[in-house]
Image (cartoon, rainbow, N blue to C red):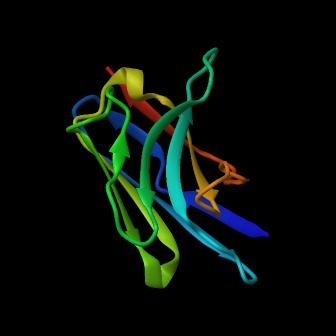
Amino acid sequence: QVQLVESGGGLVEAGGSLRLSCAASGRSFSINRMAWFRQAPGKEREFVAAIPWNGGTTTYADSVKGRFAISRDNAKNTVYLQMNSLKPEDTAVYYCAVKPYVLGKYDYWGQGTQVTVSS
């Protein structure tokens, strides 16, 4: 079992920046990939960014490319999402997730952190 705890959300003006963190903990867990998703009010949850845990290419949703950056600290079992040039349409609850194995899905999810971007 993996526990994920997100932090770093808040209220920011358009054009501002925020950095989200997600720390994973548990006993004997495996991580193949970690990712960030978000869900805006009245909308379905959508993919934001993902990073392989042991090297490889990061991936981003088109809507955040060039503005957001995902990174990790393996020693701390933590993934980060640096969000720059924020827009009101980035307002959502942001969730981190863990995919334990190559062939599988994102099995573990955090509780979410609210990001609100004012215009």
Q: In the shown orientation, is residue 35 left or right of residue 3?
A: left
Q: Residue furthest front?
A: 103
User: Which of 92/66 is in front?
Assistant: 66
Q: Where in the figure is residue 65, as x and y percent of width and height?
A: 26, 35
User: Which of 70/58 is in front?
Assistant: 58
Q: Which quadrant of the structure image shows residue 55? A: bottom left
What residue is rendered at 48% in x and 48% in y?
A: 9
User: Which of 46/112 is in front?
Assistant: 46
Q: In the shown orientation, is residue 54 left or right of residue 5?
A: left
Q: Residue furthest top?
A: 42
Q: Where in the figure is residue 41, as x and y percent of width and height?
A: 61, 20
Please say if 105 is above or below 72: above
Q: Which quadrant of the structure image shows residue 67? A: top left
What residue is rendered at 43% in x and 61% in y?
A: 52
What residue is rendered at 35% in x and 40% in y?
A: 60
Q: In the shown orientation, is residue 96 left or right of residue 89?
A: right
The N terminus, quarter of image: bottom right
Q: Where in the figure is residue 79, as x and y percent of width and height?
A: 46, 64
Q: Where in the figure is residue 106, as x and y percent of width and height?
A: 65, 50
Number of marks in picture: 0
The C terminus, quarter of image: top left
Please say if 21 is above or below 97: below
What residue is rendered at 29% in x and 33% in y?
A: 86
